[in-house]
Amino acid sequence: MDAREYLKTCAAQIEAELSRMLPPANERPARLHEAMRYSVFAGGKRLRPALCIAACEACGEKSEKALDAACALELLHTYTLIHDDLPAMDDDTLRRGRPACHIAFDEATAILAGDALLTLAFEVLVAQSKGGALAAELAKAAGSRGVIGGQAEDLAAEGKQPSADTVEYIHRHKTAALIRAACVMGGLCANTDDNALEALALYGENIGLAFQITDDLLDESSTTEELGKNIGSDRERGKMTWPAIHGAEKAKEKADALIAEAKNALTTLPVDSSALSQLADFITQRTF
Amino acid sequence: MDAREYLKTCAAQIEAELSRMLPPANERPARLHEAMRYSVFAGGKRLRPALCIAACEACGEKSEKALDAACALELLHTYTLIHDDLPAMDDDTLRRGRPACHIAFDEATAILAGDALLTLAFEVLVAQSKGGALAAELAKAAGSRGVIGGQAEDLAAEGKQPSADTVEYIHRHKTAALIRAACVMGGLCANTDDNALEALALYGENIGLAFQITDDLLDESSTTEELGKNIGSDRERGKMTWPAIHGAEKAKEKADALIAEAKNALTTLPVDSSALSQLADFITQRTF
């Protein structure tokens, strides 16, 4: 199975489960529940859930063990997209080829839908037997010392002279933290040992950084239709990116080096990690 | 000890603990961490933490056992206030006598500070031995079927003809859900039995509804200086309130009846519940 097929298989599993978890769109307050479903079912790659499942499998457990954690990751990821797109934040009107949540609904509903998805992510996790450790990992990755901290620095840096240190901080926090957590959580679901968790963390951190660099390269070279979001908007806002600082070629080399390092970390894992390896390659080879 | 003294004692405990939990204001991203501290240390009554601690004590355990849960409740409550005040939501500029978070900082920072406090609330809880049960209770109370659902319906109802059913829904979800959870979580911290948890839930639900009715009465009769927030603004926006539907006198009677019912529920609790009883009386007698 190659990475694209693996992602497809995971997405089908995840989406069925997400639909079960989310309140029905006609349940009061209906507009809020509609908005939550609208954004969750906007057709993402489901990369973070797939990484969580692949990490669980690479530690010798069945994918089912990681399903709830995988869903929690996607719920949380979706909330970050909704809030990032808000007018006060990145002010993006298009997401995954459709109007952003605050455009399709309204700003208040988008704020609340994001809040509710974040809350639901933890509700889903703590219902698990290993819920405490999983939720601790997710909260650390998602909080002010993780994703939210990255977004805060990203906004603060807009329009300023790019500094390599700040770009590094933003990428590690805004993007890599959650991808890393996805991998570690998959290991936790498989009840794996600390050595394996460390390898998964290293793998996740590296593909996370490569993912962001690739995203920025795509933002420079693709069309709005291809990406399903407004492109070139990062540059317009003076966002700091790897390609902007180091040039496209150096950025591509850096991404490749990170993927190589990530794959190297996998060699210490106890069982078959070919899915993780293929997902790592997919990160830099993707065109969307 | 009367309710005011009890609240003061709890507030001192809680605030010391909150300061330990929150990232330092000079830690990167500093503006975000400043905003989180600004809103948490705006000088609230700390009613929800106090209820959590009192419920724990009423079940025979020391206040220390409930301290982390109490802090998580206040972190979560503070996030709801920050997001509720946003321009797209209730658009309030004043909170606890000071500029609202999005005025003192900016909208993006306020959104992120709210997100980070919500995330931190769960991080604090799941570090507990009974973290799973506590986080499950908090997530249920705070999610789209709780506080967030109440806020969504509240916004949807603005400017419409008040319906008693909708007002009931909004108050139960927006206000009572978290106050009820505070009481139940206190019981969980004391490792109490299901009967006691049920009594605490009933107590919490009733004082929660009485709290909201009293809030609406104060909004009609107080000054901005007394309440530390812009008053009369609810009526201006056509918010549905108990006093608006049933008149001030009937509303006062209803609040008193709810307090009586709440105090009645306490009679089944195993140990001394005088603090909870005094806090119930305080709900309707307070002037701020």
Image (cartoon, coloured by chain):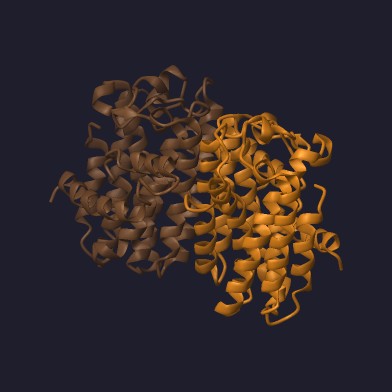
Chain colours: A orange, B brown
Query: Which of the two residues, A122 or B35, is positioned nearer the viewer here?
Result: B35
The residue positioned farthest toward the top in the image shown? B236
Residue depicted at x 74% and y 74%: A273
Residue closer to the observer: B250 or B145: B145
Q: Quadrant of residue B101?
A: top left
Indicate whether B34 appears above or below A48: above
User: Relative to residue A156, is residue A275 drawn left or right?
Assistant: right
The answer to which image quadrant residue B280 occupies is top left
Residue at the far left in the pictured view: B1
Which quarter of the image is occupied by the C terminus of chain B? top left
Where A56 falls versus A164 (above or below)?
below
The image shows a total of numbered marks equal to 0
Could you say which is closer to the camera, residue B235 or residue A256?
A256
- Picture coordinates of residue B65 (x, y %)? 30, 65
Tell me if residue A194 can be seen: yes
Horizontal and vertical percent position of residue A62 = 72, 75
Q: Is residue B65 above or below residue B122?
A: below
User: Can you see residue B200?
Assistant: no
B265 to the left or right of A22:
left
> In front: B162, or A239?
A239
**In this picture, residue B256 sits left or right of residue A51:** left
Q: Could you tell me residue B88's position as x and y percent?
A: 53, 27
Residue A150 vertical placement versus B155 (above, below) = below
| Residue at point 43%, 36% (across, down) | B82
Picture coordinates of residue A198, whole percent (x, y): 58, 73
